[in-house]
């Protein structure tokens, strides 16, 4: 079957599972306001065979208080986690959530960061799976632990396969790159800030809420529509840097650009939560 590298439909995923084609399905549902909600939803019902990835514990590293709310984990630790889920080179991975891909895109980006190419986000998420008549399993035993059946860590590339930059590098390049903020408009403008101690945005940033990548039904816009919207910036992908509140929904814009045929942009993983932790860094509002 075809390898999916950005998005996969519920129908295509069902066909893979029905045919027994090797596929690792990861449920990445999460709620920033209720961190246990995703696990609870997983236990209640999930795509058959899916394993669960928790944003705080599986897809993030240790917090120092100045490195953001969801810092990237050590690559070796994440490679070990990926291997324990049965993820190996060439095996198709499908990630899903119920927030338009906001959390599944983080897992997509992180696996690409390790060097895994065969990873896609379920377009429309769990609701699309249900709407397509997909079967649902419950997990009487709760969230599964990593499997001893897959002892080998994922053989990550020696260097990260997805480009990033840190706060110091971004500060030095402000005004010379297109910085794209994936948060909601009211947070970008500094009108409200429910999660971080300082409201506002990094000076010079462009607002592109991750929800702007979606249609009304929660699926991604067609690739040609996304391409036209991103191309209107007039900025080569290599000169685009993505950020959000904590490096999560920024990955949604990276996924959308890749699906539009515009790969190569960079992620600022620490994002606003890291940036605003240092009072010496500039802040803009409005």
Image: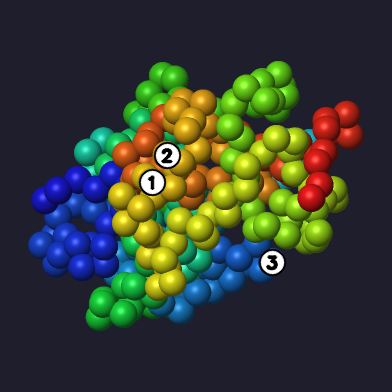
Q: Secondary structure at mark 3?
A: loop
In this rendering, is residue 238 above or below 122?
Answer: above
Q: Earlier in the sequence, mark 1 or mark 3?
A: 3
Along the line of sight, the residue nearer the viewer: 267 or 142: 267
Along the line of sight, the residue nearer the viewer: 90 or 281: 281
How far is mark 1 from mark 3, CA to CA? 34 Å
Q: Position of residue 131 (x, y in %)?
A: 31, 80
Residue located at (74% from left, 38% from top): 202
- Judge from the rendering whether residue 143 lies leftward or rightward of residue 186; answer left or right: left
How far is mark 1 from mark 2, CA to CA? 5 Å
Along the line of sight, the residue nearer the viewer: 112 or 235: 235
Residue located at (24% from left, 53% from top): 23
Look at discs 2 and 3 and give the one toward the viewer: 2
Which residue matches tag 2? 231
Tell me the number on the disc at residue 25.
Answer: none
Answer with the quarter of the image where residue 52 lies: bottom left
Tell whether label 3 touches label 2 (CB within 8 Å): no
Q: Position of residue 192 (x, y in %)?
A: 80, 60
For label 2, count other residues whose C-alpha is less than 10 Å away and answer few (under 14), some (14-19) or many (20+).
some
Q: Secondary structure at mark 2?
A: helix
Along the line of sight, the residue nearer the viewer: 84 or 173: 173
- Judge from the rendering whether residue 273 lies leftward or rightward of residue 79; answer left or right: right
Which residue matches tag 3? 33
Q: Earlier in the sequence, mark 2 or mark 3?
A: 3
Tally of numbered tags: 3
For label 3, count other residues whose C-alpha is less than 10 Å away and answer few (under 14), some (14-19) or many (20+).
few
Q: How is the image coloured?
A: rainbow
Which residue matches tag 1? 228
Q: Secondary structure at mark 1?
A: helix
Check the image and name the residue furthest to the right: 279
- Judge from the rendering whether residue 76 lies leftward or rightward of residue 244; answer left or right: left
């Amino acid at each position: 079957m075809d390898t999916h590298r950005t998005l996969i439909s519920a129908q295509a995923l069902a066909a893979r599972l029905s045919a027994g084609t090797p596929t690792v399905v990861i449920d990445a549902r999460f709620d920033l306001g209720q961190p246990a909600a995703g696990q609870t939803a997983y236990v209640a019902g999930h795509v058959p065979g899916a394993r669960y990835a928790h944003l705080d514990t599986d897809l993030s590293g240790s917090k120092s208080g100045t490195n953001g709310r969801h810092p990237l984990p050590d690559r070796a630790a994440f490679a070990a986690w990926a291997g324990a889920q049965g993820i190996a080179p060439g095996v198709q991975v499908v990630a899903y959530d119920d927030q338009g891909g906001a959390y599944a895109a983080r897992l997509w980006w992180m696996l690409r960061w390790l060097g895994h190419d065969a990873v896609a986000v379920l377009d429309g998420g769990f609701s699309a799976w249900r709407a397509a008549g997909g079967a649902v399993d419950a997990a009487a035993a709760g969230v599964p632990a990593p499997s001893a059946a897959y002892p080998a860590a994922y053989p990550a590339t020696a260097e990260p396969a997805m480009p990033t930059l840190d706060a110091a590098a971004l500060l030095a390049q402000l005004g010379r790159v297109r910085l794209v903020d994936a948060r909601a408009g009211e947070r970008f403008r500094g009108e409200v800030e429910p999660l971080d101690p300082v409201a506002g945005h990094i000076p010079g940033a462009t607002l592109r809420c991750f929800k702007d990548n979606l249609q009304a039904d929660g699926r991604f816009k067609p690739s040609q529509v996304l391409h036209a919207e991103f191309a209107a910036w007039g900025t080569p992908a290599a000169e685009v840097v993505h950020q959000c509140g904590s490096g999560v929904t920024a990955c949604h814009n990276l996924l959308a650009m890749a699906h539009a045929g515009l790969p190569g942009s960079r992620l600022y993983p620490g994002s606003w939560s890291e940036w605003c932790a240092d009072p010496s860094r500039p802040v803009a509002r409005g």
